[in-house]
Image: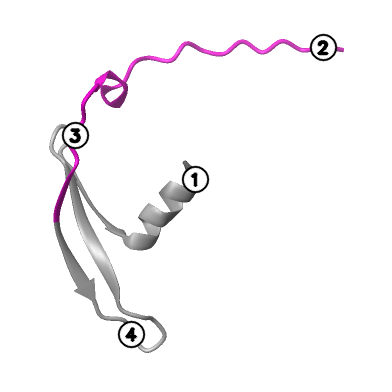
Amino acid sequence: MRRVVKCAETKPNKLADMKNMEILIKKFEKKEGGIFEKSYICYHIETPSLKLTVERRYSDFEWLRTTL
Protein backbone atom coordinates (compact mmCIF):
# COMPACT_ATOMS: atom_id res chain seq x y z
CA MET A 1 0.00 0.00 0.00
CA ARG A 2 1.36 3.39 -0.97
CA ARG A 3 0.60 6.46 1.07
CA VAL A 4 0.81 10.01 -0.24
CA VAL A 5 1.54 12.76 2.25
CA LYS A 6 0.86 16.35 1.29
CA CYS A 7 3.25 18.96 2.61
CA ALA A 8 1.81 22.17 3.92
CA GLU A 9 2.88 25.35 2.20
CA THR A 10 5.49 27.23 4.14
CA LYS A 11 4.93 30.87 4.87
CA PRO A 12 7.83 33.22 4.26
CA ASN A 13 9.53 34.36 7.42
CA LYS A 14 11.69 37.34 8.26
CA LEU A 15 14.91 35.36 7.94
CA ALA A 16 14.06 33.96 4.50
CA ASP A 17 13.30 37.46 3.15
CA MET A 18 16.75 38.81 3.97
CA LYS A 19 19.17 38.83 1.09
CA ASN A 20 22.13 40.53 2.78
CA MET A 21 22.14 39.98 6.50
CA GLU A 22 24.66 41.91 8.56
CA ILE A 23 26.43 39.84 11.21
CA LEU A 24 28.82 41.59 13.58
CA ILE A 25 31.36 40.17 15.97
CA LYS A 26 31.13 42.88 18.61
CA LYS A 27 33.83 41.62 20.96
CA PHE A 28 35.56 38.52 22.21
CA GLU A 29 36.82 37.62 25.62
CA LYS A 30 38.74 34.87 27.32
CA LYS A 31 36.67 32.92 29.83
CA GLU A 32 38.64 31.20 32.55
CA GLY A 33 37.93 27.53 33.05
CA GLY A 34 37.10 25.93 36.34
CA ILE A 35 38.53 22.85 37.97
CA PHE A 36 37.48 20.50 35.16
CA GLU A 37 37.35 22.98 32.25
CA LYS A 38 39.99 24.69 30.14
CA SER A 39 39.90 28.41 29.39
CA TYR A 40 38.19 29.35 26.11
CA ILE A 41 37.41 32.34 23.89
CA CYS A 42 33.81 33.55 23.76
CA TYR A 43 32.61 35.67 20.79
CA HIS A 44 29.70 38.13 21.12
CA ILE A 45 27.80 38.08 17.82
CA GLU A 46 25.05 40.52 16.87
CA THR A 47 22.54 40.56 14.00
CA PRO A 48 21.05 44.08 14.05
CA SER A 49 18.26 43.29 11.57
CA LEU A 50 16.91 40.52 13.85
CA LYS A 51 17.84 42.38 17.05
CA LEU A 52 19.59 39.24 18.24
CA THR A 53 22.81 38.91 20.24
CA VAL A 54 24.40 35.58 21.12
CA GLU A 55 27.63 34.25 22.59
CA ARG A 56 29.46 31.48 20.78
CA ARG A 57 32.65 29.52 21.34
CA TYR A 58 35.24 28.75 18.67
CA SER A 59 34.10 25.12 18.70
CA ASP A 60 30.67 26.26 17.47
CA PHE A 61 32.32 27.75 14.37
CA GLU A 62 34.40 24.61 13.90
CA TRP A 63 31.22 22.50 13.99
CA LEU A 64 29.53 24.78 11.43
CA ARG A 65 32.48 24.60 9.05
CA THR A 66 32.61 20.81 9.29
CA THR A 67 28.85 20.57 8.77
CA LEU A 68 28.85 22.84 5.71
Q: What residue is shown with label 4?
A: 34
Residue drawn where x is 24% and y is 22% of the image: 18
Above or below: residue 18 compared with residue 24: above
Left/right of residue 44 with respect to residue 12 in the rendered view:
left
Q: Earlier in the sequence, mark 4 or mark 1?
A: 4
> Helix, strand, or loop for circle 3?
loop
Amino acid type shown at disc 2: Arg
Cα distance in 3D space between marks 1 and 2: 34 Å
Left/right of residue 52 with respect to residue 36 in the rendered view:
left
Please state which of residues 9 and 67 is positioned toward the viewer in this rendering: 67
Q: Mark 1 vs mark 3: give the one in front.
A: 1
Q: Earlier in the sequence, mark 1 or mark 3?
A: 3
The quarter of the image holding the N terminus is: top right
Amino acid type shown at disc 4: Gly
Above or below: residue 56 compared with residue 53: below
> Helix, strand, or loop for circle 4?
loop
Residue 4 is inside the magenta segment: yes
Q: What residue is shown with label 1?
A: 67
Q: Earlier in the sequence, mark 2 or mark 4?
A: 2
Image x and y of residue 2, in percent: 82, 11
Amino acid type shown at disc 1: Thr
Q: What residue is shown with label 2?
A: 2
Please state which of residues 3 and 40 is positioned toward the viewer in this rendering: 40
Q: Which mark is residue 50?
A: 3
Residue drawn where x is 41% and y is 56% of the image: 62
Image x and y of residue 25, in percent: 17, 51
Cα distance in 3D space between marks 1 and 3: 24 Å
Q: Quadrant of residue 60?
A: bottom left
Amino acid type shown at disc 3: Leu
Above or below: residue 39 compared with residue 2: below
